[in-house]
Image (tube, rainbow, N blue to C red):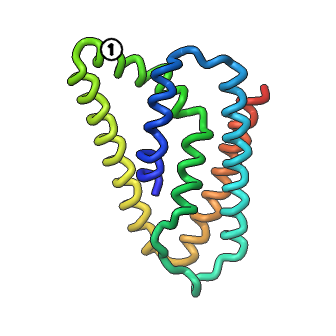
Amino acid sequence: MRTSATLASDAPIVALCLFVLSQIPAWFEQFLHVASGIFVISLAFGAYKAWKSFDPVLLTVEPGNQKSLLNASLVNLLSPGPYLFWSLITGPILLAGWRESPAFGISFLLGFYAAFTSSLISIIVVFGVMRQLGPAFNRALIGISALALFCFGLYQLWLGLF
């Protein structure tokens, strides 16, 4: 799901960052941190509720739905990471390649997303294998995910407020 969300939401992020490359004011970066923190904490709360009400009998794998794709896309759109990454690191490389030859810019972009997507697919496979370790292990992973999301949300809030 994260791969689809990234591919779905990165195009506007890349376009925006290339247009306003290095023009992002500090207050906007802080706003993105706060918005991301609030949203990630809400996701942590959902994961906590799933951990608390975990029922191994009901443990089934459902195909991703539009809501989970929307949530993952919102995380990507609200997180300052992609904006900073494309503004400060990848955007200048892409523009430099494009200025030398549009083929270089396009090759860089395609190579980047091929490597990124391959990495995410590998992570999905690893977690799919881990699922086979049983319901107690799955519940523990949900709890760890809730805690990690909560901590990351607090970190984002801290970056935006201090």
Name the residue: 29% across, 18% down: 98
Residue at image position (24%, 21%) is 102
Residue drawn at the location 68% of the way across and 18% of the way down: 26
Q: Is residue 147 above or below residue 11?
A: below
x, y percent for residue 77 = 57, 41
Residue furthest bottom as drawn: 57
Amino acid type, mark 1: Ala
Q: Residue furthest right?
A: 161
The image shows residue 102, relative to residue 126, as above or below, that is above
Q: Residues within 10 Å of mark 1 (few under 14, many from 20)?
A: some
**Lateral position of residue 67 relative to residue 104, left or right:** right
Element assignment for label 1: helix
Where's the C terminus, which quadrant?
A: top right
Residue closer to the observer: 56 or 10: 10
In terms of depth relative to the viewer, which is nearer, 155 or 111? 111
Image location (x, y in percent) of residue 36: 67, 41
Quickly name the residue at label 1.
96
Which residue is located at x 55 percent, y 52 percent?
A: 72
Q: Is residue 33 left or right of residue 19?
A: right
Q: Total label count?
A: 1
